[in-house]
Amino acid sequence: MLKWMLNDKRELLWVLAHVVLGLSCAFSKWPFIIWFYALMISSLILLVSNRNRDLITIKLMVYLLGVEQMNRSLGAWPFVPYEIGKYGTMALVAVGFLYGNHTNKKGSTAAGVAMLVLGFSGFMALPDGFAFSGITFNYFGPLNLALCMIYFSKQQMTYDEIRNVFKVLIFPVISFTTMIILHQSQAERQVVYGLTANFETSGGSATNQVAVTLGSAFAIMGLMYLTGQRMFKIKFLDEALMFAFLFRGLLTFSRGGMITGIIALLLVLIMPKTKDIWANRQIVFRKIDPRYFLFGTIFLVITFLMVNTLTGNFLLLRYQGYNEHTIASKTDNRDLNNISSNRLYIAESDFAIFANNPFFGVGVGQSRYWRRAYGYNIDALPHIEVTRMVSEHGIFGVLMALIFMFYPFYRITRERSNYRRAVMVVFFAIAVISTFHVAMRTIVTPILYGIACINLVPDKLFSSDSRPKSKA
């Protein structure tokens, strides 16, 4: 099925198929379960038959981004494991290594190996009787990140191939968006807009995870626009999807995912552009002039105002940092902790835990149980990945956090092509910033961080051009 999805002549068929999948999933989880296993079985048969020469492993990984979110919204477990994204990514990376399809012979894996080795420190301080769920919830995210850094760095893709990867990523998000639209229409009388994240508008799943998925899809569509490309050849479909992802993401009332996507696109707009003609062949960045800033601003403002009107002005109050407590107190007592929904408070407790357990930390998944012991009246899961690393892995977690945050700068500054640099900026930005409000609950960070590590090259028509570089 994956191979057929990439046939541009059947593009409309597959878009409609994913819309129909989303519509049917609004009524039952079984269409999703049947579709998931049909896709996995057919893809694995294709993978084995061609020995992963088409990098089916990577295409399946990115497809799991949307599948993971649909699975959690539908509650399809145990038929589809709750952590299918994390389990599937580890399995697919293992298969990729097994077949040894390393197309980028010069790929650097040192940072990924360092992350992998440092991550084992989280097991040193684990107490007896610890819950395995704490490991899957907290450790499998960084583990997948390290594996993706290693595996994706060894791969090379052409510009057309990476566009196909983006398309595979977008397909299940189309299904998910369709599903939550119909889900909300069914529960319209029950939807009450307020100053907290809205579960009814996000398909009943964790709103911050939904917003991250929709914000990432919005940013990818925006990247295609800025680089003068189209995801789909169907007229106006790209623009319609950008609007749908932004509109539905805003309706979740979860701010982090949407702000992250917008920041990623802004970083692409302001990043320094090189003038190396040879490096920028095939895909030329759109001229960045005031018209694009104006168009983008008008698009965002109009969409925001539409959602704000629909929600009775609660969306604006939400993005201004108000919550039910500040409104009830009738005083403007907003602070960074209120605005961040207690994430600052959780981060402070992580640093307090580290201060008393600096070497190995308190062990993977244990920080939530230690908060009250340090005077923090909150029993909350980690929400900021770098502070979780510090509290649960100790000094080794500090090293992990430094690699995680600064490795992107190393990769981006060494890149000469504007397009390749833009891909890195968008995917690294989403991967890193997302962990400051949703940790690594999903595989968004490992997969997008991995995509940013792929070595992209112009298509063969351009890379085999025999003209001298001076006349490119």
Image (spheres, rainbow, N blue to C red):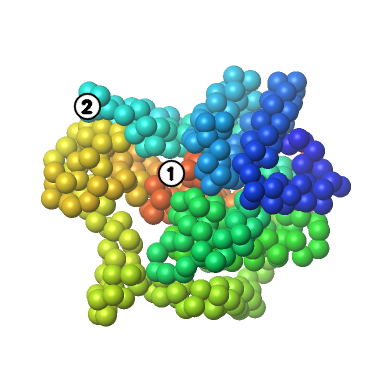
Q: Amino acid at mark 2?
A: Pro
Q: Would you name the residue on which mark 2 appears? A: 127
Q: Residues within 10 Å of mark 1 (few under 14, many from 20)?
A: many
Q: Secondary structure at mark 1?
A: loop
- The numbered mark, 1 or 2, whose residue comes first in the sequence reads 2
Q: In the displayed structure, does residue 146 sit left or right of residue 104?
A: left
Q: In the displayed structure, does residue 311 sit left or right of residue 393?
A: right
Task: Give how far apart the Cα atoms at labels 1 and 2 are.
Answer: 23 Å
Q: Amino acid at mark 1?
A: Arg
Q: Which mark is residue 441?
A: 1
Q: Quadrant of residue 330?
A: bottom left
Q: Nearer the viewer, residue 307 or 147?
A: 307
Q: Residue at x 60, y 25 (%)?
A: 96
Q: Residues within 10 Å of mark 2 (few under 14, many from 20)?
A: few
Q: Nearer the viewer, residue 280 or 196?
A: 196
**From this viewpoint, which residue is outermost toward the right?**
9
Q: Position of residue 16 (x, y in %)?
A: 78, 51
Q: Residue at x 52, y 31 (%)?
A: 78
Q: In the displayed structure, does residue 84 sit left or right of residue 329?
A: right
Q: Position of residue 247 (x, y in %)?
A: 59, 66
Q: Secondary structure at mark 2?
A: loop
Q: Nearer the viewer, residue 1 or 77?
A: 77
Q: In the displayed structure, does residue 123 sit left or right of residue 187?
A: left
Q: Residue at x 35, y 72 (%)?
A: 322
Q: Is residue 160 above or below residue 188?
A: above
Q: Is residue 140 above or below residue 410?
A: above
Whether residue 456 appears in this view of the structure is: no
Q: Residue at x 29, y 66 (%)?
A: 338
Q: Position of residue 5 (x, y in %)?
A: 77, 42
**Quadrant in which the N terminus is drawn:** top right
Whether residue 193 appears in this view of the structure is: yes
